[in-house]
Image: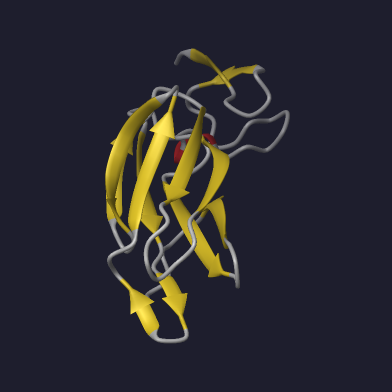
Amino acid sequence: MAIIKCPECGNNISDKAKTCPNCGYPIETTNPNGSVRIKFSFVRSAGGVNGNQKVSLIADNQTLWKGQAGSVIDLTFTGPTEVTIIYHISLMHWGGQCTGIIDPNKSKKYNVSVRQGVFSTKLVLQPVDVFDSD
């Protein structure tokens, strides 16, 4: 048995604990290797789905990934990391961006949901248990 710190409250606990006795955080669901999956949802418009929307994921002023909406990617993070996600302006859609925290200790999956407005695109980064189908 080893003593570890709870990723949620920081208290010392047994590595055999299923949950933190202090805050109830589920210890056995932590992700020690830091890998996460991120789904970048499609931009939907009146004409249907635009699969050509360019997307970037940036952390610490470095572009970690560039690709297209609709992608599901696997990345590794060493701990909680602030990221910026940018949906670039295209001929069909206004661009948009959001900033959020990816924490591999709290969730292994994140979804970027997209809401296309009249003059802007609203993006939301959120942890999820499962990805919904498009």
Q: How many marks?
A: 0
Residue 128 appears at what percent x and percent y? 50, 56
Asked where in the image residue 63 lies, by quadrant, the reply is: top left
Left or right position of 25 against 52? right
Residue 104 vs 86, above or below: the answer is above
Residue shown at 39%/68% (left/top)?
Answer: 42
User: Furthest-front residue in view?
Assistant: 91
User: Furthest-right residue in view?
Assistant: 22
Residue shown at 57%/55% (left/top)?
Answer: 124
Residue shown at 60%/66% (left/top)?
Answer: 119
Image quarter where the C terminus lies is bottom left
Residue shown at 43%/28% (left/top)?
Answer: 59
Q: Nearer the viewer, residue 36 or 112?
A: 112
Residue 13 vs 49, above or below: the answer is above
Residue 52 appears at what percent x and percent y? 28, 65
Q: Nearer the viewer, residue 5 or 85?
A: 85
User: Furthest-bottom residue in view?
Assistant: 47
Residue 89 appears at what percent x and percent y? 42, 56
Residue 65 appears at what percent x and percent y? 29, 39
Asked where in the image residue 1 lies, by quadrant, the reply is: top left
